[in-house]
Image: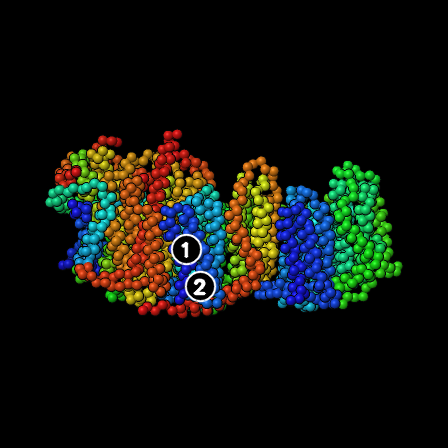
Amino acid sequence: MLDIVIPIAFAMVSVALFLSLYRVIIGPELPDRILALDTLYINSIALLILLGLHLGSALYFEAALLIAVMGFVGTVALSKYLLRGDIME
Amino acid sequence: MEWLVAIVIGVMTSAGVYLTLRARTFPVVLGLTLLAYSANVFLFAMGRLTIGQPAVIDAAAAGYGDPLPQALVLTAIVIAFGMTAFLIVLALKARSELGNDHVDGLHRSHDEQETKQ
Amino acid sequence: MSLLAFNLPIVALLPFVGAALAAWASRFHRVASAWVSAGITVLALAFLAPAISIPFAGETLIQSWAWMPSIGLDFAFRLDGLALLFALLILVIGLLIIIYARYYLSTKDSMGRFFAYLMMFMGSMLGIVLSENLLQLVVFWELTSLSSFLLISYWQHRQDARHGARMALAITGAGGLALLGGVLLLGHVVGSYNLTDVLAAGDMIKNHELYLPILVLILLGVFTKSAQFPFHFWLPHAMAAPTPVSAYLHSATMVKAGIFLLARFFPALSGTPEWTWIVGTAGLLTFMIGAYTAMFKHDLKGLLAYSTISHLGLITLLFGFGTQMAAVAAIFHIINHATFKASLFMVAGIIDHETGTRDMRKLSGLLKYMPHTAVLAMIAAAAMAGVPLMNGFLSKEMFFEQAVFATETSAWAWAIPVLVTLAAIFSVAYSLRFIHDVFFNGEPKDLPKVPHEPPRFMKIPVDLLVVICLAVGILPMFTVAPILAVAVAGTLQATPPEYSLSIWHGFNLPLVMSMLALALGVGVYMIRERLYKLHDQILGRVDARVGYNALLNATLTLSLSVTRRFDKGSLQHASVWVIGAGLVAGVIGFMTVDAPLFGDRATLPIDAASLTAAIVLIAATIMTVLVHRQRFLSLISIGVVGLIIALGFVKFSAPDLALTQLSVEIVTIVMLLLALYFLPQITPKEVSKLRLGRDGVIAVITGIGVTLMTMAVLTRDFAPISEFFLENSVPGGGGTNVVNVILVDFRGIDTLAEIVVLALAGLGIYAMLEGMKLPARDRDAQGRLWNPDTHPAIMQTLTRLLLPLMLLVAVFIFLRGHNLPGGGFIAGLIASVALIVQYLANGIDWTSDRLKVDMHTVIAYGLLIGTGTGLVSIAIGFPFLTSTFEYLTWPVVGKFEVASAIAFDIGVFLVVVGATVLSLVQLGKLSRASHDYAAQQEKN
Amino acid sequence: MMLKRVLPHPILSFILWIAWLLLNNTVDPGHMVLGAILAIFIPWFTAAFWPEKIKVQKPAVLAKFFAVVLWDIMVANFAVAKLILGRNDKLQPGFFEVPLEITTPIGISILANTISLTPGTVSCDLSPDQTKLIIHALHIDDQAQMIADIKQRYERPLKEVFVPC
Amino acid sequence: MLEFILSLLILIGAFFTLVGSIGLYKLPDFYMRLHGPTKATTLGVGAILIASAVFFTVRGEGISLHELLVTVFLFITAPVSAHLMAKAALHIKTKRLERTQSSLSQE
Amino acid sequence: MMQLTAFPVLLPLVAGFILLFARMGGLKLQRALNLLITIGLIFVSIEMLKVASTGAQEVYLSGNWAAPFGIVFVLDRLSALMVFMTAILALGSLWYAIATNYDAKGSHFHVLFQLQVFGLNGAFMTGDLFNLFVFFEVMLLASYGLLLHGGGRLRTKAGLHYVVINMIGATLFLFAVGALYGATGTMNIADMANKVADAPAEYRGLIAAAGLLLLVVFGIKAAMFPLYLWLPTAYANTSAPVAALFAIMTKVGIYSIIRAHGTLFGDDAGDLAFYYAPWVLGLGIITLALAALGVLAARGLREQVAYLVLASVATLLIGVGIATPAAVSATVYYMVHSTLIAGGMFLLADIIARGRCDTDDRFESSPIMANGVLIGSAFMFGAVAMTGMPPLSGFFGKMLILGAALEHQWLAAVFAVVLIASLLSIVAMARSGSLLFYRTQPSEQAPGEPLNKSAFVAVVALFATAPIMIIFAHPITAYTDLIAAQVFDAASYIDAVLSAPATERK
Ligand code: NA
Ligand code: NA
């Protein structure tokens, strides 16, 4: 069953990836794009974990963890820039 | 798949080259970052592409990716990081010393407006 | 050891020692340097003396040592008749000049400098004439150019001196370089740079295909040095030098160096039509132009300068005839010219010295003020004019004879004697002018000084030379004959032909020419005023220097336009060239070898997820370009690119790379954001569409090139060395993560150097930011004031938890690195990001207050530990960075691995943290300084 | 007292210890020891970044709170999914303020996050005096009811758990 | 059975991930779009992570619960990022749908 | 295995962090330590010269991994000489920096300085292509810091250009080594040379392309046309001691071409044997022509010296491009001369600029400077040496290169350009010398600084190279001949590297 489910899930996440990309490109405003980037990060985690399930390898966990961490930091930094310009004052 | 990777490398190189040839420091930084990305992926691809075969010794592994380019790319990424960081700050330094962010330090009316703000 | 084994280099090098001594001696007494120089000259003569008999015995003395044997440059000296003649001329006339100069120079002139230069020059000349090795000869040749530059520019406050010196250097230096080229070719053809071999290989040289280039290059050296047409114009400008210098350079030495070379190479190069044509034509033209122009110079030294040019042309013409007899005449005239020209220059110097001017329009009737000098001048001038009983007559007679003889060589050669006579007429006229205008012709006008005889010792050198002129002219067989014979033998490298030195050869054509010249010369002098006017209207405006200046200016203009056009200080311009060069190199490289672009390795199928990721990446990349002017936006899109690359690394089995890429990406974006605050938010549109198009085309072509190159590799198989790493990672490196083992063990040096790069980046950034100030913006690009909430509370509270958690993750990634994806570098970046988050949430001050560690020290410890691990292995007798590992078993904890590579990795970790945080903190300080700065501006 | 010095933040230490074991996917004794060392060392090392003590009372209330929130997240998601997949023009978005009674920063933060994770609301801003949360709702039927729900379901338990010290 | 649960978890996860992005794609203003990724995507990825945990645990190499850590992390950070983005959007006065109600005291 | 082989790399590295620790101890401590270490480096390099002079090719297996798996350092005649030259130049530059207080004008001068030497020596010693890349980057980053040291408008601009161009260069480097790895599967130069020699025909286009790409990378460092645009401004605008130290930077490019291309595409490379050489030669000739025009067009002394450096590197490129043992021997001889003299000349230019006060180094007349005769004589000496006039070593170097060109079919072009370029340099230097020292005005402005005698010592020391290289031309050219012979015996290099055994573990 997983052989069918995982490709379907891949497809769905891929579509999600495209939709997020759409917002990155179209915006229209900066917060939209930051949000879309943030979503892309989280979508990527899904994609990675699916890949891990697909290949039966646990080696992708760290990457997923790091994407979560780095995605957050990126979003915070970008938002802070909109708020204050100076992100480390 | 090889074509896909090659095209991706090519596109990043194109973009990198184009931005590197811009007249302001910021796009140049972006351009060099993209160029570094493309060079890193290129170097990585030189070990040929393998899927599901990480270079971690494992009794169950069916095979391994080429670890050497990976190690080299890791080094290259770090070096590019150091270089980019330096360049970013240098761009600030140039802005501070030259009064604008043109790579040749030219004065343009736009800058003067910027500085007034 | 006999003196004859090494005296020649001493003779040549002594003057250089003398130069240093002279400069040094001037500290003690003003004239000390003159006596030192004279002493050194006498000493050099003494060292030469024992060898004099050798050429007279028909032998050649050679003293040689290996210097640069690989190229055939020996430290080699030679004394044959020709060398002896010139060495004696240089030393004897040099000695006289030194004595003369001691009285000539005024108290304002630096004696030390003058004599030092003069001695350098003397040494260089001796080096030329005594060289056996041609390369060594070129060395001394160029040294004469240099030292003459110094001598001519001796009165450096005078513009004409500076210009004259530079012109002389440029012309003679150019000739020297041509000579070098010619000599190298010559040596190449002969297979040796030693004169003995070259002179013996005349026929081979003349028949070689390189003969003409060799000849032309060497003659360029000769003609420039000897002021032959069309390079003659530097010589009059060199008259800005003090007169002793002119007397020395233009009688016996500098200009004679070229003549010497003609004589030296006579056996090797002469006798061909090319030789006759080039040398003869140059000589003839020079002879005529010099003689003619001398007539119209109102400056005494100017007259002498053109006269010198003319006589050099005469000698050159003689060599150009290419016959042995002509060579005899040439050598003879060299001697004669040296004597009478040196005396005339010295006379001119005396007149200048005692009257304060050299303008013949002011000078007149000096006979009664300085009769002794007048007599000397008259005799020397007569010699110059070729009046019988003077030495000049004899050699000129021989010259006329050769000119007549030359008519036999070709159909129209009848012109030669005619033209030669014409020139001789002018020679007589200017000689007459020198005497009549100065010593007779009424009373002097407005002289700056009251003229009187010079000091006794200033005249003694002239006395001596004039006596020689007379002695040779009257009794040639008892005076000049022996030295002339050996000199000719040395020149021809053969037994000299039969020639006669008697005064009377009967009534023949040469004598008719002489008489004609004398008579018509007087006539020309009579109508001089009319000629002056005519000359001023027509030829007086022709100045050979114009050509030189035009060439010089053209070169300057060219250099400016080429340099400013290529090196225009534009980064974009430079970048285009570099990128273009890379592109061209790749394409040309592929075309070097006839091989297919792609191989036939099987490729992997494309799956949907990869395709998706690739499309996202390409779209984001293109977006980055399209929106790059909106800088903040381009940061977001480049963030997407970085993310997908990381995913790609995961996909293609490189988790370590993915982790690294992710961490680096975020730190980079944070730094870019920090920087963007101080930069314009928008990149202005300031470039033409054309330029954008050009850049676009370059970019696309480069991209295509890289794609094809990638495919060229990926479609081919290869056998990498990586098998070894996979096999030895566990048994040899103690880790299952082969990538990490390569980094910390197999290729530890790479990693060590890489952390040095990071450390340097950190330190460099620190240094750059020190004291930097930039205006802090108080509103964003749209003109909105910033949000007053500096540190949003919710972020502050929750990110606090992140610090310990992320540090935990860092430790986790660090410890597993050796066996699973991770390692010191990634861990270091995670720890750095953990700290960055604190900076973001709580600000620089708050965080820095809590992080009391000096990051410099952290970096230093990192490097210490990284390097130290490697040094330990040296200490126990293994190469640097040899790793070791051990499995330990502890109670409770169980079995675990201790590897030196882990210590190494700690060093990596520390440097990464230190460098990253150091940079960020310093950037943060910039912001604080900027806010203070902004506040202060507000206040003012 | 000794314990205080070794474990300035026992809860944090506990969280780290658990996190370590989770990270390593193990209950291996070696890792338990190592995890304990880290759980002590890291809080000690980062103590400076934790200036104020967090006082947690009534852990049972906290546990119940988390259970409620988890449940709400599940439900919220189905609700939000329906709203998202439905027609845009049926949505009635809006901003409103929730006056706060809770005062501890940690409490406010957890409340704000909870609001963001649960039914159709995102906390957008905190008033400078930290007395009001500004909320955006994807769809508002009854604003007053929403505010009341938030205060009832989330603020009250949090207020009990996190008390100012 | 286990495979069924796994499949269900994966499908639910993928579904919510997609829903989040659909929300991001189709909703009319930023504030509304924010809701999709904040909740749906977070939950979706959480579900997939839990599926992964289950998968690797039952595969027999010992328990694999570290995916939980990522899930927890996401649940902590997602609302913080949402909060900051919304704050930024409010600050720069990002356009909102015209019919958006507002009962804010300061505007 | 001899541990000494690693010392030129390790000593500056250790110095790097020691100096970083010494930051606390103040400038005096850092100066003393740096001087001590630099002098130590000279002794180390002398030892290395001694070892190398036997003809030994000492191979150091870092990490005790045999080639091609680990990274090797190779000590042979050429690398020993490069290390020695670097140490000498470093001492001169350091001495000057201390004497003039340049090192106090910003942070971390001493650390950057030693790590620069670390990068340089690493590049000279390594036998691994990727490791060469890494050491290039070390060298570059250190040089970025040093270049900018002291700050200032023009310096910053020059630094920006320098950094960007070199970052593009780094990218090209990665593409080149990547492609070479993709074709040969190895990074060790010796091993790669074997693989290149054995490569089947269909791989050769790829290898050739990568090789030329690599040439572009080295060409940037070696300031080969059209890649040299970073050089004039960088050298002209950085501080004197840094410019002096940078004199070696261009030589890294030259060295790398000799080492990497010479080994990879040597006699055994079949149809790729020396295929790069015509490019080096042709571009070298163009570079020389443009450099000579630049010397003539320069607006100030520093810029002029920078172009003279460019001209000297171009001459070296010509030597490398002729690609015969005689040419390489000549190149090495001229390299030693031009590096050390250029270093001294940059220092002298600074002394002159200081002595002239307001007019700085611009070609305008200014009041007489203090000790004008001494400085003028030094200038004359330097000008003679740099323009390649006799009797100094520049002339002999040029002569050797021209001599080596005699057998080459491009003889005429080489002769014409080298000789005419010399002439233009001579004309230009005569002009600038006469402007700087002869055309002085009566002084009304405040005179410039008095001569810093201790700083001048560094100039004299570096200039001493010229007479030494003349007087000892016989042994020196004999040694450079041996260097060339060793360089051209790629097979023995390859054999030495690949057969070096790892140390047995007990
Ligand atoms: Na008169
Ligand atoms: Na979120």
In this rendering, the label closer to the viewer, 2 or 1:
1
Classify mark 2: helix, strand or loop.
Answer: strand
**Total tally of numbered discs in the picture:** 2
The image quadrant that residue C846 belongs to is top left
Cα distance in 3D space between marks 2 and 1: 17 Å
Question: Circle 1 sits in a helix, a strand or a loop, which is it?
Answer: helix
Residue C877, image x and y in percent?
35, 65
Which residue lies at the image location 48% right of the left edge and 55% below the top edge? F88
Q: What residue type is labelled 1?
A: Pro
Residue C804 x, y percent position in the rendering: 23, 48
**Quadrant containing the C terminus of chain A in the rendered view:** top left
Tell me whether marks 2 and 1 sit on the same chain: yes
Q: In this view, does C922 lie above or below C187?
A: above
Name the residue type under label 2.
Leu
Quadrant of res D104: top left
In the rendered structure, the residue with mark 1 lies on which chain?
F
Q: In this rendering, would B75 be left or right of C104?
A: left
Viewer-side residue, C186 vs C660: C186
Relative to D82, say whether C888 is above or below: below
Q: Can residue C770 be seen in this view?
A: yes
Asked if C125 appears above or below B61 in the picture, the reply is above
Q: Where is residue C36 in the image (x, y as percent from the top left)?
A: 67, 52
Query: Residue placed at 62% from the left, 63% from the top?
Result: C75
Tag 1 residue: F12
Residue E75 vs residue F105: left or right? left
Label 2 or label 1, whichever comes before in sequence order:
1
Task: State the quadrant of the N terminus of chain A.
Answer: bottom left
Residue at the disc numbered 2: F75
